[in-house]
Image: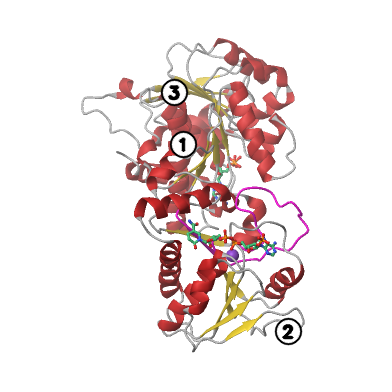
Amino acid sequence: MKILTAAQTRQLDQATMRAQHITSVELMERAAGALAEWFYGAFPHERGEILVLCGPGNNGGDGLALARLLHNAGYAVRVALLPTAHPSADWQHNRQHLPGGVPVAELAADALPALAPGALVVDALFGTGLARPLAGLAAAVAAHLHQARARVVAVDLPSGLLADGPQPDPGAPVVRADYTLSFGLPKLAFLLPQNAEYVGEWHVLDIGLDQGFIDQAATPWHFTPLHDASVALPRRARFGYKNTFGHALLLAGSRGKMGAAVLSAGACLRGGAGLLTAHIPGGGYDIFQTTRPEAMCLTDAQANFISELPDLGPYQAVGIGPGLGQEDATRAVLAQLLRTATVPLVIDADALNLLGAHRELLALLPPNTVLTPHIGEFTRLTEKAHDDYHRLDLLREFAQKYRCVVVLKGAYTAVGAPDGQVYFNSTGNPGMGTGGSGDVLTGLVLALRADQRLGPLHAARLAVLAHGHAGDLAAAATGEAGLIASDLVAHIGPALQALTE
Ligand SMILES: NC(=O)C1=CN([C@@H]2O[C@H](COP(=O)(O)OP(=O)(O)OC[C@H]3O[C@@H](n4cnc5c(N)ncnc54)[C@H](OP(=O)(O)O)[C@@H]3O)[C@@H](O)[C@H]2O)[C@@H](O)CC1
Ligand SMILES: Nc1ncnc2c1ncn2[C@@H]1O[C@H](COP(=O)(O)OP(=O)(O)O)[C@@H](O)[C@H]1O
Ligand SMILES: [K+]
């Protein structure tokens, strides 16, 4: 699913009207209808009055049309208008069609609407047409909503927030919505941590926008929903056997962090690898063999860390990093791996930290390597980003420069591809913020890299999608707080099953 800019969204509206021979008023009516349907589902028994705040453009027009539909459906609705000399044509149409029974007032700085605590407010002040930061009356309204602790439903965008870029004036107020209801496609702003306090819970409502325009629109940004055919897992061949499904090598663990190796190995096995060999510090042997009997095990001469690179001959993919530690000898193993590997690599955790601390090693990264940094690890590999948008620029630059797939982990994990495209993930939940979750992802990516039917981007995107889905399945059973990384491993099977072709 593509993510478009505000400018592209305006073109998409025009293309939809042309292709479907509808007027802008008709398109607005569809948008309002979709908003109203959402309201009926979310607030079926709302008794209090709903205040609809309308700006001068089509966002305000959506608000006026929604007010009419809610009133006709029996809700108590009141409208407050931002004073304007030049309302949009569709605004005027919907103003004229507002039923007489809906009270309408103009907003004024010295008489902002009284709001009972928890009052339900629709923010239809500004959407994608926002041309400058909120100031004056609009800014006062945004602050008033916040102080009054109103429940705010934003139409298309919380007013004051840009759809696709950082705020020009970070100090200017932005409406803090509990819900944001957008049309057709998600907006880039929804996916970034810095905007979470404004966007709240967001939903995309289908209003039948022109798919032809969307298909040809150029954008680096994509969103991967749970069921995305382009990243499905191919079925296993009926006559396949363990050697068909890939033999993975995992270099992981150090004293005190053998659990990372165990978790990662579990995920690799549950991810469908035909065979898994783990190379671990000698002192971890009993732990590993006892907890992961399905995996084979090579022990390092060192008891507490890894100092030797095994012969890579038998393997279809190599993963390195979980619980690895940052010993000099381990760094030498990483360097040797980068120099000699001819099979796909997956690099995580301390292996990334070693790369960050010794950046000369970055030049050795084989193309199509998958790196799985969280934000802290990514910062060590690159530089401190000014904000979340700048970090996305850094992600694209890094993936293009090193011809690698970079999985920037977190809520809506962003997968950067060597061609500069970025794919945001839709699955997962905050319960996954628990030690070892990333180690599980590494094992799963490794299994899918050992699967020779999948390319690096497909493997990384599918692993991220399945890992998040496993987290969602696990959280349904344990709750978010109770979720631990082992639960992710246990749910990889059903998650992958749900994502199989
Ligand atoms: N496919 C879709 O997504 C569909 C989208 N639709 C809806 O259309 C919305 C976009 O409508 P839009 O283009 O009329 O822009 P909108 O956000 O109402 O603002 C423009 C007005 O605000 C003003 N203005 C701007 N900034 C300001 C500021 N800081 N302070 C004060 N004023 C400011 C600006 O004035 P000006 O800059 O000219 O002075 C102009 O008057 C979109 O978000 C969605 O809700 C649906 O109806 C159909 C399907
Ligand atoms: N709020 C969240 N929503 C979705 N996924 C999350 C969230 N928090 C963490 N995760 C996922 O959990 C994993 C955490 O990885 P990481 O920080 O490397 O953990 P660890 O180092 O403990 O293994 C990542 O895949 C990340 O995307
Ligand atoms: K809005």
Given the image, on which type of amino acid does mark 1 rest? Answer: Arg
Task: Indicate the position of residue 298 as horizontal and vertical percent values.
Answer: 50, 19
Q: Residue at x 41, y 40 (%)?
A: 215
Secondary structure of the magenta portion, mostly? loop
Circle 1 residue: 461
Q: Between marks 1 and 2, how big is the CA–CA gap?
A: 51 Å
Look at the image and tell me in which quarter the C terminus lies: top left
Which of the 4 image quarters holds residue 380?
Answer: top right
Circle 3 residue: 248
Assess whether mark 3 and mark 1 are in contact (beta carbons under 8 angstroms). no
Residue numbers of the magenta segment: 155-184
Secondary element at tag 1: helix
Task: Indicate the position of residue 236 as horizontal and vertical percent values.
Answer: 28, 31
> In the figure, 210 relative to 244: above or below?
below
> In the figure, 265 relative to 84: above or below?
above
Q: Residue at x 53, y 30 (%)?
A: 417
> Can residue 489 be seen from the camera position used here?
no
The label nearer to you, 1 versus 3, is: 1
Circle 2 residue: 111
